[in-house]
Image (cartoon, rainbow, N blue to C red):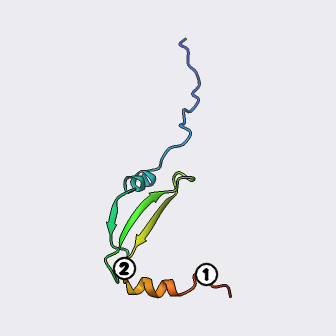
């Protein structure tokens, strides 16, 4: 009779999902697009305090009409 230890499932504490791995691969990359009104680029970054949370920022060109309109408006105006 061999020794058989009923398996403790060996689970790493935290496994990066495939989506997370894909997103992480994009960190630091510039992705063209994100705005129909200028040659904006998008840049992915991972939240330092919350690993696994990714933020895709859109960086508009100077003089982008859409961005100018948006920044004039107050975001989240309370009703
Ligand atoms: Zn733009």
SS category of the residue bearing label 2: loop
| Mark 1 neighbour density, 10 Å: few (under 14) some (14–19) many (20 or more) | few
Question: Dividing the picture into quarters, in which one does residue 63 lie?
Answer: bottom left
Pick the residue in front: 37 or 24: 37
Q: Residue furthest right?
A: 79
Tell me whether circle 2 and circle 1 mark residues in contact (CB < 8 Å): no
Q: Residue furthest top?
A: 1
- Which numbered circle lies on residue 15? none
Task: Give percent across and percent down for residue 46.
Answer: 48, 56
Count up the numbered dots.
2
**For ligand 1, which image quadrant applies?**
bottom left
Residue that carries the numbered disc 2 in the rendered image: 62
State the CA–CA distance, disc 2 to disc 1.
24 Å
> In the drawing, does residue 60 fall left or right of residue 46?
left
Task: Give percent across and percent down for residue 2.
Answer: 53, 13
Task: Give percent across and percent down for residue 37.
Answer: 35, 84
Question: Dividing the picture into quarters, in which one does residue 22 lie?
Answer: bottom left
> In the drawing, does residue 4 fall left or right of residue 56?
right
**Residue drawn at 57 percent across, 81 percent down:** 75
> In the drawing, does residue 11 fall left or right of residue 67?
right
The mark nearer the N terminus, 2 or 1, is 2
For residue 77, above or below residue 58: below
Residue that carries the numbered disc 1 in the rendered image: 76
């Amino acid at each position: 009779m061999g020794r058989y230890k009923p398996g403790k499932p060996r689970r790493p504490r935290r496994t990066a999902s495939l989506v997370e791995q894909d997103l992480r691969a994009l960190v630091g990359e510039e992705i063209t697009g994100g705005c129909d009104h200028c040659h904006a680029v998008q840049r992915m970054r991972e939240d330092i305090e919350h690993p696994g949370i990714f933020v895709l920022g859109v960086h508009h060109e100077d003089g982008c009409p859409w961005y100018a309109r948006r920044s004039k408006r107050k975001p989240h105006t309370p009703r």
